Amino acid sequence: MSDWTIDRAVDELLGREADRRAGDRLSDDWEGLDLPTAYRVQDALVRRKVESGERVVGVKLGLTSRAKQQRMGIDSPLTAWLTDAMMLPEGAPVPLHELIHPRVEPEIAFLMGERLCGPGVTATSALAAVRSVHAGFEVIDSRFADFAFALPDVVADNASSARFVVGGPGLPPRDLDLAREACDLGSDGRVIDSATGAAVQGHPAEALALAANSLGARGIAIEEGWLVLSGGLTDAVPLAPEQEISAEFAHLGTLRLTGV
C-alpha cells in the first residue's frame, strides 16, 4: 500500500526544484497517481508557490505536437501554470545554476485581452479573446531524471515548467496567419530546426481553445491579462553555459537566450 499523498508529492517535487536534483518517477511507487490525481498535485503545488509569494500570470500547454502525444499515448495536450517567478525579461540570461537540466523550445505566445472560459470554446472564439501575439521561449526543466516520466508524473510536475520569455510588443492576431508563421531555431548562429505554427495542433488557436476547454472542465478560466504559451514548435534543445539559442519568426521578431 503506497503512502503517497498529494501533500507528500508536492513536498517532494518542490524539494527537488529547490535542491536542483532530479529523482525517480512518482508513478513507479504511487499506483494511485492517475491523471485527475496528478492535476490535483499540480494545483496544490502552484497554490504552495502562491502562498510563498508568487503570482499566477498565465497557463501553458504541453505535448501539443502529434508526435509527442503518440509517444506519451495521449490524444490531447496537457495544461500547467505560469507564475511571475518563472518569467525572464527579454534579453536576460538564463541562470543555469538555478536549474537541473534545462531545455529550450520556441513558442507562439498569446496575451489575453478578454477572459476565456470553456466549455464550448472554438479556435475562432479563442483568437477573438487575444489582445496580442508574441514570440516566446519556454525553458523546461523536469524534476525527473533524464526527463523520463509517465504522463501523470509530468502533469504533477507542472509540465516541467521552469522559466519563460515573451518578446516584443506583439501583433494583433488579425494581422497574422498563425498556422503559417515560420520559426527557425538556432544554436550559436546555426539553424538547427524549423517549424510553423501548424506544428501546434494544426493552429496555435486550436491549442488555446483546448486549454480553455480543459481548464473549464475543472472550473477554471483563462483570465484577461494572462499569458498563454501555446506549445513547443520544435523539440526542446538542451541549453549549456555560454550557448545562445535563437528563434527567428517570420513576423513576430527574433528572440535570443544565453545560458550563464
Image (cartoon, rainbow, N blue to C red):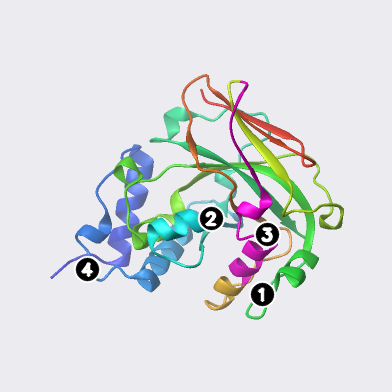
Report x, y in % for residue 25.
27, 53
| Residue drawn at 33 percent across, 44 percent down | 16
> Dot 3 corresponds to which residue?
203
Q: Is residue 210 left or right of residue 18?
A: right
> Dot 2 corresponds to which residue?
65
Q: How many marks?
A: 4
Chain-order first, disc 4 or disc 1 = 4
Q: Nearer the viewer, residue 114 or 234?
A: 234
Magenta range: 189-212
Distance (Cα) linking label 4 and label 3: 36 Å
Question: Which-is-in-front pick, marks 2 and 4?
Answer: 2
Task: Tell me, yes or no, whether the two marked residues, 4 and 3, touch with CB atoms within 8 Å.
Answer: no
> Dot 4 corresponds to which residue?
31
| Residue drawn at 74 percent across, 50 percent down | 180
Report x, y in % for residue 234.
56, 43
| Residue drawn at 66 percent across, 43 percent down | 136
Chain-order first, disc 3 or disc 2 = 2
Q: As shown in the figure, which amino acid type bears the numbered disc 2?
A: Ser
Residue 221 is inside the magenta segment: no
Q: As shown in the figure, which amino acid type bears the numbered disc 3?
A: His
Q: As shown in the figure, which amino acid type bears the numbered disc 1?
A: Cys
Q: As shown in the figure, which amino acid type bears the numbered disc 4?
A: Glu
Distance (Cα) linking label 1 and label 3: 19 Å
